[in-house]
Image: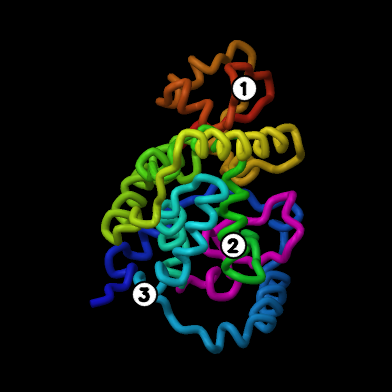
Amino acid sequence: MKIAFRAVYPAVVLLSFALLSACSAHKNTVSNKQARRNNNSIQKQNREAIAGYTPFTVTSYIERFKKIAVKEMDLYGIPASITLAQGLLESGNGNGELAKVANNHFGIKCTSDWSGKGYYKNDDRDNDCFRVYNNPEDSYRDHSEFLKRKRYAFLFELDKNDYRGWAYGLKQAGYATNPKYPDLLIGVIERYQLDQYDKPEGEIQKIKREDRVLAEINQTIGVEKKDPGVNSTPSEKLHTVTTGDTLYNISKRFGLTVDELKALNNMPDNNIKIGQKLIVVK
């Protein structure tokens, strides 16, 4: 018997996830009228796909996207089980509005470097801008590219079948604010045996893959590529550095460890400066 994923994980759980990808300022200041007009245009462009849409079950979603997830795993080292589990969670088994209308299966928002179309929905802010893709395959590829950021670089040093390491590492790197996110991912993977699609790799293969992906990540460091989180973080979750502040006393003030504070803010070292805004709430 096929069991719909939402029966196991209610929508209220799905709404607790927070991809920390921020919509660029100019795309996040649209009026309700502008958002409706834009969304209507996107819906008209995709009306044939929407009209002929057949709802997914967990089983049919996995069957549809497993080969794509394996392809991304072989290219980048992200376990296929992790990609499939995130796709199921973030898209409501592919049945959510963003997945159906915008081919967006991971809830990735517009950023300053995004030149494609946007689809507006209320999320962290009113009329948050989400990326629109030509097809679901582009969404899966962009998910891989999205993770090729400095804050996630350490994950690509894990074995590509280490789904537990990836699940906890994503939370550590600030991918989601839900403290139970790793457990939710692992629960989905093990419930539906998604780890059967993960593949081990030999030592030489691993070294070559790591070198290639980490080199690509290093090339983007210093390039204007707005990192998720800071612009979209509510002011009550930010602390402005003042004279006398150190990472240690800031972390203690907000009940964090120094490492947690650094991970939240994608900091490579302990250096801070007056006026700098730091995320201080997980």
User: Looking at the picture, how far across and down is residue 150, in whole percent?
Assistant: 61, 34
- Say which residue appears at 61% left-offset and 39% top-offset: 213
x and y, in percent, of residue 171 in the image: 43, 40
| Local crowd size for mark 1, using a 10 Å CA cut-off: few (<14), some (14–19), many (≥20) | some
Does residue 28 lie above or below 209 as drawn? below
Question: Predominant secondary structure in magenta?
Answer: loop
User: Which mark lies nearer to you, 1 or 3?
Assistant: 3
Label 3 is placed on what type of residue? Thr
Q: Amino acid at mark 1?
A: Val
Q: Quadrant of residue 180?
A: top left
Colour approach in the figure: rainbow
Residue 241 - label: 1
Mark 2 or mark 3, earlier in chain: 3
Marks 1 and 3, the one that precedes in the sequence: 3
Outermost residue on the top side: it is 244
Task: Pick the quarter of the image with the N terminus.
Answer: bottom left
Q: Which mark is residue 139?
A: 2
Q: Nearer the viewer, mark 2 or mark 1?
A: 2
What residue sits right under mark 3 in the picture?
57
Distance between mark 2 and mark 3 Cα atoms = 19 Å
Residue neighbourhood size for the residue with mark 2, other residues' Cα within 10 Å, grouped as few (<14), some (14–19), many (≥20): many
Q: Secondary structure at mark 2?
A: helix
Query: Which stretch appears magenta?
Result: 95-123
Q: Amino acid under label 2?
A: Ser
| Corner quadrant of residue 114 | bottom right
